[in-house]
Image (cartoon, rainbow, N blue to C red):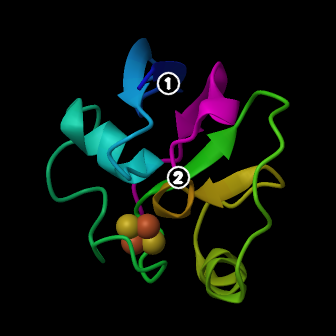
Amino acid sequence: MSDIKIKITDREGVSHEIDAPTDMNMNLMEVVRSYELAPEGTIGICGGMAMCASCQCYIKSEHELPEKSDDEEAMLAEAFYVKDNSRLGCQIHMSEDLDGLEVALAPAEP
Ligand code: FES
């Protein structure tokens, strides 16, 4: 199976182009963690349950993403630094149609 290329801007503003596998059932939050693009303990705090917003990111490319679930909408309604293009990384599953995705990590919650 193929990897896809994703561009991730970390919280320091540094951009990383990384390969993400599409056959390991990973989500974007897990990809960020596996490449250690955010310090341990600052991302993925709820384990990917759409309950913490520590994985919030801004979608910078024009990809069609699956609709937000009610849980994701509710969490983003309460989170800090939310913009129109905010999504929870843990709710974005790596698939081939996301090749070329560009995202920026939102700041850590205060
Ligand atoms: S890891 Fe907690 S909402 Fe995504």
Of residues 99 and 89, the one drawn nearer to the viewer in this rendering:
99
Place of residue 43 in the rendered image (x, y in percent of width and height, measured from the top left): 30, 56
Establish if 46 lies above or below 27. below
Residue 36: % across, % down: 20, 33
Q: Nearer the viewer, residue 85 or 91?
A: 91
Residue at 34% of width from left, 40% of height from top?
Answer: 31
Q: Amino acid at mark 2?
A: His
Tell me if 66 is positioned left or right of 28 in this view. right
Q: Does residue 17 show up magenta in the picture?
A: no
Q: Look at the image and tell me in which quarter the C terminus lies.
A: bottom left
Q: Quadrant of residue 75?
A: bottom right
How many residues crowd mark 2 within 10 Å: few (<14), some (14–19), many (20+)? some
Position of 55 relative to 96 (above/below): below
Specify few, some or many for label 1: CA neighbours under 10 Å numbering under 14, 14-19, or 20 or more.
many
- Give, as a single range, the part of the protein colored magenta: 93-109
Closest to the observer, 21 or 102: 21
Q: Position of residue 34 (x, y in %)?
A: 21, 38
Q: Quadrant of the N terminus?
A: top left
Where is residue 80 drawn, in percent x and y? 58, 68
* Image mark count: 2
- CA gap between label 2 and label 1 equals 18 Å
Q: Amino acid at mark 1?
A: Thr
Residue with the mark numbered 2: 93
Res 110 seen here: no
Q: Which residue is mark 1?
A: 9
Side (left or right) of 83 relative to 50: right
